[in-house]
Image: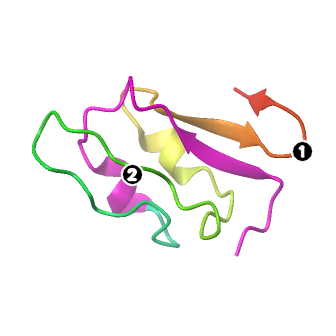
Amino acid sequence: MTHSSNIAELHLELCIGCGACVDICPTKAIPLTIIGYFSTLTEIIEEKCNGCGECIKICPHHAIRWLNRNNHTKE
């Protein structure tokens, strides 16, 4: 489903598991795998990510960033 060369990448060390990205993702690329308030998500499903960036915009902890699969991280 990826329409862009950019996909979202989760940085677990910054994620507190608030779930804001889960609710905003239009393609359900971020599974609801939160096990409590200070837990972390497991991953963003690359095949489902359409590169819209909504999760990056909404993350209050800057735990999600662009990953350009063709080159390097785009922050």
User: Would you say 2 lies left or right of 64 here?
Assistant: right
Residue shown at the point (43%, 60%) measured from the top left? 30
In the picture of the structure, the residue carrying the numbered disc 2 is 21
Question: Which residue is the extreme one toward the right?
Answer: 70
Residue shown at the point (62%, 60%) measured from the top left? 46
Q: Nearer the viewer, residue 32 or 42?
A: 42
Magenta residues, start to end: 1-24
Residue kind at label 1, given as amino acid type: Asn
Residue shown at the point (40%, 32%) measured from the top left? 12
The local crowd at label 1, few if under 14, some if 14 to 19, many if 20 or more residues have their Cα within 10 Å, is: few
On screen, residue 61 above or below 69: above
Quadrant where the image shows the C terminus = top right
Q: Nearer the viewer, residue 10 or 60?
A: 10
Query: How far apart, in angstroms, are the residues tagged by discs 1 and 2?
Result: 24 Å
- Secondary structure of the residue carrying numbered label 1: loop
Image quarter of residue 5: bottom right
Q: Which mark is residue 70?
A: 1
- Secondary structure of the residue carrying numbered label 2: helix
On screen, residue 57 above or below 42: above
Residue 60's spot in the image, x, y percent?
Answer: 36, 31
Q: Which mark is residue 27?
A: none
Q: How is the image coloured?
A: rainbow
Residue 57's spot in the image, x, y percent?
Answer: 51, 41
Residue shown at the point (41%, 60%) measured from the top left? 24
Residue 29 lies in the magenta-colored region: no
Residue kind at label 2, given as amino acid type: Cys
Quadrant where the image shows the N terminus = bottom right
Residue 18 lies in the magenta-colored region: yes
Q: Nearer the viewer, residue 18 or 32?
A: 32
User: Would you say 71 lies left or right of 67 here?
Assistant: right
